[in-house]
Each structure stands twice: as C-alpha cells, then as structure tokens.
Image: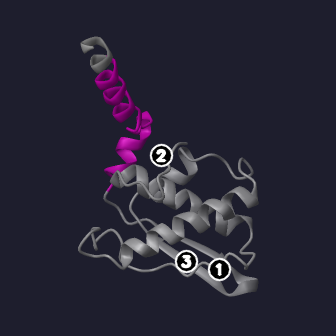
Amino acid sequence: MYSGLAILVLSFIMACQSGKVAYTSGESDIFNSKGNDTVAIANDSLEYEIIIIEPGFDAWLHSVARPEGYYSQQFLENRNQIYVISWNQRVTQPFRYDPDLYTLQIDYDPQTDYGYEVNYKLYNYFIYFQRKYNQRLAGFIPRI
C-alpha cells in the first residue's frame, strides 16, 4: 500500500518538475537586459501595427527563437488566436493577474490574414513573454 502511494507522490513531483522551463544559456542575459528595445510588427496593406517595447525581445528574436519559416502560417495563426484570447482575459482581471504585465488588450481577428511576419513576431513575443515572466498562457509550456 505504501509503495503505491510513494510511486504516486514521486510521479506527481516529477510531473510538476517537467512543467518548468529550461532556459538556454543566452536567455538569462537577454532577460536581464535593461536597455530599450522596440520591435514594430506591421502589415502596411492592412494598416495593422503592434509595437512591442520590451527589453531584450529583439535580441531574443534574432538569437534564440526559431527562424522564420520554421512554423507554418496556419500554426502561428492558431496559436496566436489561443494566446490572444488568454491574454485578453488576463487584461480584464487585474486583481487576479499582474496588471503591470497585462496592460492592453490585443485586437486580433482570426478572419484577417495578417501575413506571416506579423504572426511570426506576435507568436514569438508570446513565447518570450511566457519564458521571461514565468507565465503560462492557455496551458502550453513555451518551448523553443
């Protein structure tokens, strides 16, 4: 009886540890950078623009994130839609989620084709954000 309980507890402990994100060697330095870093995500033909002011994101995008073309546009759109819903829910719950992290809602229409670059950068911002601030949007573990 006790051995079954021990295995159950051990399995629970291992499951909890597997949810932790292992950072790459360069990520810690990037996450701790303090300089200004602005990335504009735009699609001129749709007159759509997101400006991300997040120290280290541009460096992370170019040194850690998967390269453009790694993911399909459909994958990026699907994940972005899920992440945006979770993000926007957190913006509306400032007593439950840190309002300094979740400040503004994101207007993302799944029926609009924003193009690959917008979806790629937005998706990678969500991954960067989750890894840097130890957040989990929509239950996905943010892997690279």
Question: Could you tell me the amino acid type at mark 3?
Answer: Ile
- Image location (x, y in percent) of residue 49: 60, 81
| Residue furthest to the front | 1
Residue at the disc numbered 3:
50
Residue 57 lies, in percent from the top left, at 46, 58
Classify residue 122 as left or right of residue 118. left
Mark 3 or mark 2, which is nearer the start of the sequence?
3
Q: Is residue 27 magenta?
A: yes
Helix, strand or loop: magenta stretch: helix
Question: Which label was assigned to residue 109?
Answer: 1
Nearer-N-terminus badge (3/1): 3
Tell whether 86 sits left or right of 69: left
Residue occupying image coordinates x 75% and y 54%: 72
Q: Which residue is mark 2?
A: 141
- Give the amino acid type for the residue marked by disc 1 in the picture: Asp
Q: Quadrant of residue 75?
A: bottom right
**Quarter holding the C terminus?**
top right
The secondary structure type at the circle numbered 2 is loop
Residue in the image at 37% along x and 24% along y: 11
Q: Secondary structure at mark 1?
A: loop
Q: Which residues are magenta?
A: 7-33
